[in-house]
Amino acid sequence: MEGHAIITRMIERRLTPLLLQRLLEAPAVILLGPRQVGKTTLAFEVGRKQEALYLDLESEADRARLSEPELYLIDRLNRLVVLDEIHRVPQLFLALRGLIDRARRAGRRAGLYLLLGSASLEMLKQSGETLAGRVSYLELNPFDILEVTESAGDAAVDRLWLRGGFPDSFLAADEARSLRWRQDFIRTYLERDIPQFGRRIPAETLRRFWVMLAHNQCGLLNVAQLARNVGVDAKTAASYIDLLADLLLVRRLPAWYANVGKRLVKSPKISVRDSGIVHALFSINDKDALLSHPVVGASWEGFVIENLLTVAPEGVQGYFYRTGGGAEIDLLLHFPDGRLWAVEVKRSLTPHPERGFHSGCADLNPVRRFVVYPGAETYPLTKDIQAIPLRELAGLLVEQR
């Protein structure tokens, strides 16, 4: 596999124990995530021991079974029912509410429904209003650094960065097939999936917009500039960003908001969440091409930030910090107890924190300070700043649970 370690066993998803726990606690669990991220595979895994009933709402036959959902599901209250692509039939939420309440009266209070869907505002609105108090939400992301290194060791880090974490891309037999999968994934989203959410956007316009976001990877969001570059008005450009963010394909990283007596940058940073999709938008097909491409630094920064936010314990919030005077922290991790961790990202084997990082830390006094770099060893850079590989910092974060 072109120098990559071969993965000999299935990659275990870290979300599995939490999903099983939520099914023991809530009548319904909604598992959200972009298409092809592995939601159905995970649902089969957790439902196998429970002999779950699986219905794919993209199938006409399965939708026909649910033309009268109460009649079809009432006799199946003793089984876990998996409803895939639930956003295709949003009217089901009201029926599920009645079925859940009926099951509760009969004594069964958890593990009734596992609902899978590509995230959308409409779906969240429907479930939030109809299933309030009856539903728990979880998000499944592409493979993260801890999942792949558990299976294939540190050799998988560059592979994950280049190919991204979508399972079919990461596990492809070679780089060419991985890139082809991602290019097909982008095309399918543009031509088929996004129109299913009711948004009639010319595919080529949205593709150019997506490429513009990749060019601005981890940069400040400037909606007016993006709109001019693509030839649409600012309101339309903002709606494109909302759509891609709702589909969990783009992240807006908010600016730190605390009053520190400085003039703070308030615009969020914008990034395409999966590094493999960034590279596919530029047709980058191997590591050599990536290392010589202008996006390499921003791609590495986005890759690090996305992985840290993916593995962060529940309740940890991510921000960046920048002042008009030049203080800057690439990623601030804010824990529920008020602690702050400061992270700078460097694509260098001899990393040195910038003056702006020192200034930002002086402003905010974070309890831990790290510089993530692509090396293999953790060591001190100063008395209070550590150079650390991404995998090691991800592991430290998980231990904070």
Image (cartoon, rainbow, N blue to C red):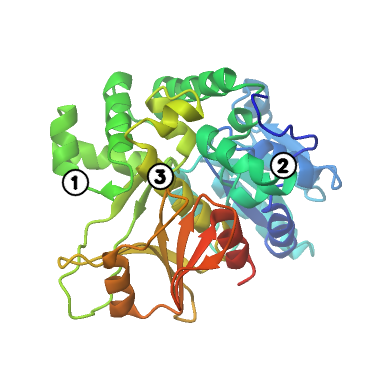
Residue at the image point whose x is 67% and y is 43% from the top: 70
Please state which of the two labelled residues, at mark 1 or mark 2, is closer to the viewer: 2
| Amino acid type of the residue that numbered disc 1 sits on in the rendered structure | Asn
User: How far apart are the alpha carbons under marks 1 and 3?
Assistant: 19 Å
Please state which of the two labelled residues, at mark 1 or mark 3, is closer to the viewer: 1
Q: Name the residue under label 3.
A: 246
Viewer can see residue 161: yes
Q: Mark 2 points at which residue?
A: 152
User: How far apart are the alpha carbons under marks 2 and 3?
Assistant: 32 Å
- Per the image, label 1 sits on a secondary structure element best described as loop
For label 1, the crowd category at 10 Å Cα-Cα, with few meaning under 14, some 14 to 19 and many 20 or more, is some
Taking depth in this image into account, of 196 and 219 the one nearest to the observer is 219
The N terminus sits in image quarter: top right
User: How far apart are the alpha carbons under marks 1 and 2?
Assistant: 39 Å
| As drawn, 359 above or below 217 | below
| As drawn, 311 above or below 212 | below
Viewer can see residue 69: no
Dividing the picture into quadrants, the one containing residue 38 is top right
Taking depth in this image into account, of 388 and 315 the one nearest to the observer is 388
Number of numbered discs visible in the structure rendering = 3
| Amino acid type of the residue that numbered disc 2 sits on in the rendered structure | Ala
